[in-house]
Amino acid sequence: MPTVSVKRDLLFQALGRTYTDEEFDELCFEFGLELDEITSEKEIISKEQGNVKAAGASDVVLYKIDVPANRYDLLCLEGLVRGLQVFKERIKAPVYKRVMPDGKIQKLIITEETAKIRPFAVAAVLRNIKFTKDRYDSFIELQEKLHQNICRKRALVAIGTHDLDTLSGPFTYTAKRPSDIKFKPLNKTKEYTACELMNIYKTDSHLKHYLHIIENKPLYPVIYDSNGVVLSMPPIINGDHSKITVNTRNIFIECTGTDFTKAKIVLDIIVTMFSEYCENQFTVEAAEVVFPNGKSHTFPELAYRKEMVRADLINKKVGIRETPENLAKLLTRMYLKSEVIGDGNQIEIEIPPTRADIIHACDIVEDAAIAYGYNNIQMTLPKTYTIANQFPLNKLTELLRHDMAAAGFTEALTFALCSQEDIADKLGVDISATKAVHISNPKTAEFQVARTTLLPGLLKTIAANRKMPLPLKLFEISDIVIKDSNTDVGAKNYRHLCAVYYNKNPGFEIIHGLLDRIMQLLDVPPGEDKGGYVIKASEGPAFFPGRCAEIFARGQSVGKLGVLHPDVITKFELTMPCSSLEINIGPFL
């Protein structure tokens, strides 16, 4: 959950009254938020860097408030205050309007070169805005919160805000080679090429985290005005020429990205939060965006939409008995203007542009529950009683684990993910023959695929414990994953039992004896008759020739046992003989 830091006195001033810490904590809880911490800038610096660094820092009390990750409208003081005031019914939710300019509309032209890097852009203008130091700080802080949240650290959307009075439209959003882009970046004193900037920002504690988004691309995105002045090089840095200050009166806002929907949401949130400070409150000047195909669209959309929900559905889902009128009132308090229509059981809800989190009827039901108060919902006993039972497969697993331990084997729990080498090369198998499920973006080479056998994990465990006294007798009962086109997810889990014996001699007879004991426990008699089990000579790339057997039970192959091939032992950095057993326990249920 994102955490919003607000100055307590500034918050109380905006709310029009003061609260004790306990009262405000209770108010936050009622509204579905949590007052996480009461601190100050000085206290924060003191904790992180020591008292010496904290000397001279502000003692102003800060409230740190945890906000739900999908409530982008509460990520700044303005949205928080507006939401709480509507919730307490002190004000009505404002109506946001998009207006056309008196003169020429600002235009942002997107060229086709952006298609392969950041193809989307939207824009708007906040006209005749009045900033104070606190308002300006809140404006910058909201952009940072959005970047970290919905923008996914600028990977999906990057926000640029510019002093419109220093620029001349129309604006062009294009992509160029890094060596062809040269401008003076924010808070720098001279011009740099894009290549030079990427090198400079590699040591910047803040901007270095965003460089990977474009640094390996042949073209970098850039926005120019009609005079060739660079506004920004998204998603890295804005130009110094158009930087906004407390005295800025007209702001041009552009959002570029790879996700068009999120770019529109981000633009709507910024302009709705700060249009409060415009000369004409809650109005936003439109900007025209021309796409490479020649089509043009006007932004911000600031779209209101209507949803219909039945009152009896809300009552049923929440577990309350409220009249449709009361439910409509509860929803209105949550910034969702509602009224009862039709047969008297239907509620029409108006979703404002600030509530992008409202997608389905269940989101509306959740807001009704918050407004009603979770603590006010009466506890009731369920009408039906059920007694939980363990899954048969898990119950069998637990029973086998205890008996394996009783047989002198030690349980190991290994990772479900492993490298391709572990399940293929080291076992003498081609990776295409394993039917392994591959991870699309593995963090490390150790976690490239889902395991198709438990054996590599146990052998790696033995390799890490070679100094332990011999013999080493390990087992594991866990799931393996195999590709299966017949399932809805394209893969299927199988519960396997694997045991390994590692000593100066192979110990095949010990592994064979363990198999007999397992079959005895599973009530599977030896022999092919009456659903019994047999072992038949077989070959496998992981096993020593002539020392491998396939296990058949109840008419089907359930696994293999044998002495591992010396090449396999060597590849897992082991030096002594090893025998193994691996069976699928699913057929024995």
Image (cartoon, helix red, strand yellow):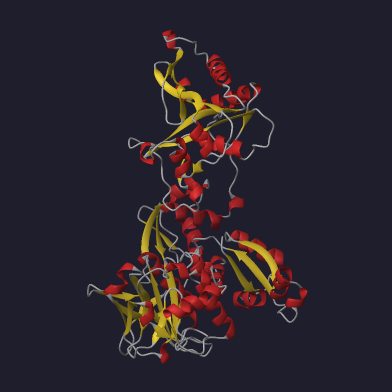
> How many numbered discs sit on the rendered protein?
0
* Quarter of image, res 399: top right
In this rendering, position of residue 41 left or right of residue 482: right
The answer to which of 510 and 570 lies nearer the viewer is 570
Residue 51 position within the rendered picture, expressed as x and y whole percent measured from the top left: 77, 74
The front one of 299 and 503 is: 503
Q: Quadrant of residue 107?
A: bottom left
Q: Residue at x 42, y 66 (%)?
A: 156
Q: Residue at 53% across / 47% down in the picture?
A: 320
Q: Is residue 97 above or below residue 436?
A: below
Q: How far from the left and from the top, in percent, is residue 80?
A: 55, 70
9 is higher (above) or lower (below) than 446: below
Q: Residue furthest toward the left?
A: 294
User: Compared with residue 478, is residue 224 higher up or lower down, i.e. above or below?
Assistant: below
Q: Nearer the viewer, residue 85 or 429?
A: 429
Looking at the picture, how far across and down is residue 179, in whole percent?
Answer: 38, 80
Can the viewer see residue 415 in this picture?
Answer: yes
Q: Quadrant of the N terminus?
A: bottom right
Q: Position of residue 254 (x, y in %)?
A: 40, 77
Which of 118 and 544 lies nearest the eye of the viewer?
A: 544
